Amino acid sequence: MKVSLIQKKEDYEAALREVERLLDIGSDAAVLDELATQIEAYEDKHYPIPSPNLIARISYFLESRGYFKS
């Protein structure tokens, strides 16, 4: 199976459906890996997650360990 480049939202949604289908049937890991790489690249470009600032990271660290309640 040839995996094409994900360029638009419809391609992205089709790729997600294809991954789900392939996982259900226990398909070849190489195909899933290629699809995951393409999906990740699309998500990085269209749905970026900004890094938290230093204060937010320290607050999360302290809260998650029960040292500090905000």
Image (spheres, helix red, strand yellow):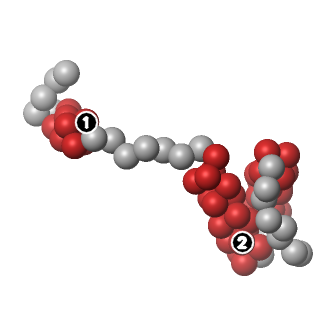
Relative to 5, 54 lies left or right: left
Q: Is residue 18 visible?
A: yes
Which residue is pictured at 87% across the width and 75% down the height? Answer: 2
Q: Where is residue 52 shown, x and y percent of the image?
A: 33, 41
Which residue is pictured at 61% across the width and 52% down the height? Answer: 45
Which residue is pictured at 67% across the width and 55% down the height? Answer: 42
At label 2, counting other C-alpha atoms closer than 10 Å, the crowd grade (few under 14, some 14-19, many 20 or more) is some
| Residue hosting label 2 | 34
Relative to 11, 49 lies left or right: left
**Helix, strand or loop for disc 2:** helix
Q: Is residue 65 visible?
A: no
| Residue hosting label 1 | 56
Quadrant of the snapshot with the N terminus = bottom right
Q: Is residue 27 above or below residue 45?
A: below
**Helix, strand or loop for disc 1:** helix
Relative to 53, 48 lies left or right: right
Q: Nearer the viewer, residue 19 or 46?
A: 46
Instruction: Please state which of the two labelled residues, at mark 2 or mark 1, is closer to the viewer.
Output: 1
Q: Which of 19 and 5 is in front in this view?
A: 5
Q: Nearer the viewer, residue 19 or 39?
A: 39
Relative to 44, 20 lies left or right: right
